[in-house]
Image (cartoon, rainbow, N blue to C red):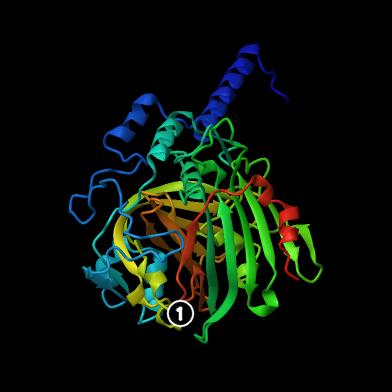
């Protein structure tokens, strides 16, 4: 027997539906903070939104403006020095003593220690070197009260030229902070990708030129002029010989929820450019010979739509930081048979946001669960752990943040990914013993990042 709904019952149901709809909008669409909350960016928070004060133990110092001292005579393209080269470790952690420090170690770092007796982390004094130009601080303050997510958190609007969500409220906002983290306006970078299989013998997977620009961060731009593409990149491969001439072009947009990534690939054998919709998500990364997935680059890169993103919290953890030394050593001094040489990697104690990603309902991805650790001062992810469908820890990654006082900023560009099951690893954006070239340049015209431009660069 069907129950007849009265007029009052219908109105009540509609009101409840509207209430829940409003709550959903609050978590995903109405994300800007109040002017009173934004005022914290000029008080107890840094201009980027981190806690300005140090910790009670004194092991994390207060932020004092970052590291902006450019060495005398420095010019773009020069190798960037290690500004803290004379310091000694305050702790050295390995499988022998990891239990003493377990609460400040990620699952992946602990797994690497258990897997290899030679893996350790040397912890140095903490330096909060992160900085932005003054105009970016001003834009960040504006973003606090105007920037919002939309499309259930998959897109953003009202954001430009600064940290989009300096006072983040949910996992999607934090991930947008990561995706739009500061790397300057435009750069060109010469680097190599090395793969170290289970036999411990390094192989160069790619020798590349990366030309990237970030229209979201153009100093002379504005929210009104911004067309939505926050990153455009042209990646040209010069070696090894069998890969020479391969090229990729992609453009990522703040409207990922509706437009998604635009990508093209130059195919050497066909001498033509084709649209490449599979360059993303869990497609094996051709630049790294398929050892990782495209969206594992930089800990995470691309659309947020495959996962539900949740803030787990913020805590003090040991992470790689101010790792300029890693780019100043040669290949033989960095690439070990099972892991990067611990002597070359600097770790520090920093506060990080922990964000967990679980596969969304009806979604598919080879990695059903991920956990990312975002540096509180830059919002760039510095650590990442991934689990397979059986719940087994599978991939663990860490970035190697470099201090670039000429930018100014601390940039997360090079990264290593370890496959704990296959017992191999790779490092991306490494100079291979050559002077590390990460040269800031003037932005290219938008016409440079087009399929026609990609085709014109084809070498064979």
Rendered location of residue 41, percent (x, y): 33, 35
Q: In the rendered image, which quarter contains the N terminus?
A: top right
Nearer to me, 344 or 347 = 344
The relative height of residue 106 versus residue 27 in the rendered view (above or below) is below
The secondary element bearing badge 1 is classed as: helix
Q: Residues within 10 Å of mark 1 (few under 14, many from 20)?
A: some
Residue pictured at 48% horizontal, 29% vertical: 146
Determine which quarter of the picture holds residue 372. bottom left
- Residue furthest left as drawn: 57
Residue at image position (36%, 54%) is: 405
Q: Is residue 35 above or below residue 171?
A: above
Q: Position of residue 408 (x, y in %)?
A: 38, 50
Q: Nearer the viewer, residue 287 or 18?
A: 287
Query: In the orientation shown, which residue stands out farthest toward the right?
Result: 270
> Mark 1 sits on what residue?
331
Quadrant placement of the C terminus? bottom right
């Amino acid at each position: 027997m069907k129950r007849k709904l009265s007029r009052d019952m219908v109105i009540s149901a509609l009101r409840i539906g509207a209430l829940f709809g409003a709550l959903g909008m609050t978590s995903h669409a109405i994300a800007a903070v109040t002017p009173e909350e934004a005022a914290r960016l000029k008080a107890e928070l840094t201009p980027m939104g981190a806690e300005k004060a140090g910790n009670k133990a004194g092991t994390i110092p207060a932020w004092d403006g970052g590291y902006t001292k450019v060495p005398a005579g420095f010019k773009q393209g020069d190798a960037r020095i290690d500004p803290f080269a004379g310091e000694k470790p305050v702790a050295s952690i390995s499988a022998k003593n990891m239990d003493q420090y377990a609460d400040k170690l990620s699952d992946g770092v602990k797994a690497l220690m258990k897997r290899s007796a030679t893996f350790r982390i040397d912890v140095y004094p903490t330096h909060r070197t992160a900085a932005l130009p003054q105009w970016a601080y001003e834009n960040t303050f504006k973003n606090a009260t105007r920037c919002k997510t939309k499309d259930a958190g998959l897109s953003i609007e009202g954001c430009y030229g600064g940290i989009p969500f300096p006072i983040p409220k949910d996992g999607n906002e934090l991930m947008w902070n990561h995706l739009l983290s500061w790397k300057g306006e435009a750069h060109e970078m010469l680097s190599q990708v090395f793969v170290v299989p289970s036999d411990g013998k390094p192989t160069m997977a790619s020798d590349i030129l990366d030309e990237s620009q970030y229209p979201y961060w153009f100093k002379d731009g504005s929210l009104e002029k911004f067309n939505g593409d926050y990153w455009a990149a042209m990646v040209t491969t010069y070696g090894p010989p069998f890969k020479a001439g391969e090229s990729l072009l992609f453009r990522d947009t703040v409207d990922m929820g509706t437009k998604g990534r635009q990508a093209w690939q130059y195919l050497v054998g066909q001498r033509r450019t084709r649209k490449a919709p599979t360059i993303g998500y869990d497609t094996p990364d051709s630049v790294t010979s398929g050892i990782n997935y495209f969206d594992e680059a930089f800990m995470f890169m691309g659309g947020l739509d495959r996962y539900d993103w949740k803030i787990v919290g913020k805590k003090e953890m040991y992470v790689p930081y101010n790792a300029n030394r890693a780019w100043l050593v040669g290949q033989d001094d960095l690439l070990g048979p099972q892991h990067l040489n611990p002597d070359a990697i600097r770790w520090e104690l920093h506060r990080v946001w922990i964000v967990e990603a679980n596969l969304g309902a009806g979604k598919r991805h080879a990695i059903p669960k991920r956990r990312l650790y975002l540096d509180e001062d830059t919002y760039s992810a510095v650590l990442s752990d991934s689990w397979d469908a059986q719940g087994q820890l599978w991939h663990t990654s860490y970035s190697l943040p470099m201090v670039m006082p000429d930018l100014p900023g601390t940039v997360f560009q090079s990264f290593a990914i370890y496959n704990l099951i296959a017992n191999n690893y790779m490092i991306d954006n490494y100079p291979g013993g050559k002077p590390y070239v990460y040269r800031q340049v003037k932005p290219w015209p938008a016409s440079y990042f087009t399929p026609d431009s990609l085709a014109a660069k084809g070498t064979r």
